């Protein structure tokens, strides 16, 4: 069974999947799982001392995925968990984790920054505007399913 799909939607799906594959390849090159890469990347973005729920919100990954990946990164010596408020556990990079981030995550962020900088300021704004509009509309129509 097939459905009539807009040709632009087919191309968008192809590009979206290609970008996901590129990030997967980056994680593989860095000898990290996709979720491990996302956790370390997010720590670069929001900083040490964040909570697992902050990482879940930032990555849109499930609580279970984040929990098991944080535990693996902790076991491997890259992260340490310290008690926060109540039952919350704050996540911190160890010295080994900081070295890993500088060596492996910073270059990935640099590649993203360079990719974005290769667009004009007008293209950057339009890219963001259209992607946000797409996500907002998709959320609206997905709620009707």
Image: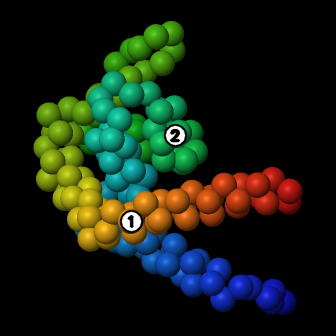
Q: Is there CB contact under 8 Å for labels 2 and 1?
A: no
Point 35% across, 53% down: residue? 37
Seen from the viewer's position, the closer of residues 91 and 14 is 14
Q: Position of residue 126 (x, y in %)?
A: 47, 65
Which residue position holds label 1?
122
Point 79% across, 88% down: residue? 4
The number of callouts visible is: 2
Q: Is residue 30 above or below residue 90?
A: below
Residue 81 placement, left or right of 16: left
Q: Residues within 10 Å of mark 2 (few under 14, many from 20)?
A: some
Whether residue 118 is visible, yes or no, is yes
Q: Nearer the viewer, mark 2 or mark 1?
A: 1
Q: Position of residue 43 (x, y in %)?
A: 33, 39
Q: Is residue 86 above or below residue 63?
A: above
Point 43% across, 72% down: residue? 19
Quadrant hosting residue 27: bottom left
Colouring scheme applied when the structure was drawn: rainbow
Quadrant hosting residue 31: bottom left
Which residue position holds label 2?
56
Q: Residues within 10 Å of mark 1 (few under 14, many from 20)?
A: few
Q: Secondary structure at mark 2?
A: helix
Point 43% across, 52% down: residue? 35
Q: Is residue 10 above or below residue 98?
A: below
Whether residue 28 is visible, yes or no, is no
Q: Secondary structure at mark 1?
A: helix
The image quadrant where one finds the N terminus is bottom right
């Amino acid at each position: 069974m097939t459905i009539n799909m807009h040709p632009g939607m087919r191309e968008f799906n192809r590009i979206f999947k290609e970008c996901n594959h590129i990030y997967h390849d980056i994680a593989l090159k860095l000898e990290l799982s996709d979720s491990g890469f996302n956790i370390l990347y997010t720590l670069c973005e929001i900083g040490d001392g964040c909570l697992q729920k902050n990482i879940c919100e930032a990555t849109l990954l499930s609580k279970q995925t984040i929990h098991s990946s944080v535990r693996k990164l902790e076991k491997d010596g890259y992260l340490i968990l310290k008690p926060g408020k109540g039952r919350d556990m704050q996540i911190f990079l160890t010295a080994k984790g900081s070295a890993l981030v500088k060596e492996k995550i910073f270059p990935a962020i640099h590649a993203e920054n360079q990719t974005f900088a290769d667009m004009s300021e007008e293209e950057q704004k339009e890219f963001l505007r259209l992607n946000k509009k797409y996500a907002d509309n998709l959320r609206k129509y997905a709620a009707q399913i």
